[in-house]
Image: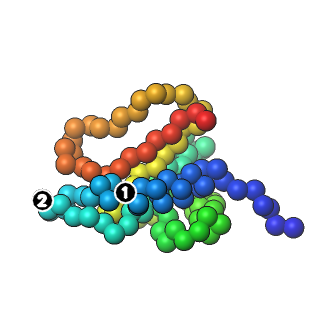
Amino acid sequence: MQDESISFYAYSIFNLTRSVNKIPNLRYAHIDKQLVEWQELVPTFTNFNQETELFYSLWLEGLTDYKSVDREYKKLIKEYANKTGIAPMGVVPPNVVNISSIPWMHFEHFSSQSGANKNNLTPLITSGKY
């Protein structure tokens, strides 16, 4: 019998990405000083390397249904589990929504604005303890 457990994080990534893609204002970006609207955003998500105690970023493309997203998510997590780079899959696509989760921490506000890129319109969604 096949394992039927689902990943809540993958489920969240799937649904958050579907929701964000329905909102045109969240699909804008600055490219070469021009405002562009992406047709679709691709979710990048963080995962934690237990051995190095560092986070790294992966992404999913072609989100058609939750079950295929869950399978691809689990495959990526396993495939890149021992990598040490911040983006082990290579160059991150430009049309992304950044999704991360720190489920062991409670917080009411989260900001990763460094001020280095003042025209960055990339959506960032971070969830805490749930």
* Residue type (three-letter) at the residue carrying disc 1: Ile
Q: Nearer the viewer, mark 1 or mark 2?
A: 1
Which of 9 and 21 lies nearest the eye of the viewer? 21
Q: Is residue 46 left or right of residue 71?
A: left
Q: Is residue 110 above or below residue 77?
A: above
* Residue type (three-letter) at the residue carrying disc 2: Lys
Regarding mark 1 in the picture, which secondary structure is present there? loop
Label 1 crowd (10 A; few <14 / some 14-19 / many >=20)? few
Mark 2, residue position:
33
Residue pictured at 41% horizontal, 29% vertical: 109
Q: Let me know if residue 88 appears in the view.
A: no
In the rendered image, the residue lying farthest to the right is 1
From the top left corner, tell me how far across and down residue 118 is, in percent.
19, 44
Residue pictured at 46% horizontal, 27% vertical: 108
Label 2 crowd (10 A; few <14 / some 14-19 / many >=20)? few
From the top left corner, tell me how far across and down residue 98 is, in percent.
41, 51
- The scheme the figure's colours follow is rainbow
Which of 125 and 56 lies nearest the eye of the viewer? 125
Mark 1, residue position:
23
The answer for how far apart the CA atoms under marks 1 and 2 are is: 22 Å
Q: Is residue 96 left or right of residue 56?
A: left
**Considering the image in quadrants, where does the C terminus appear?**
top right
Q: Is residue 35 left or right of residue 127?
A: left
Residue pictured at 55% horizontal, 30% vertical: 105
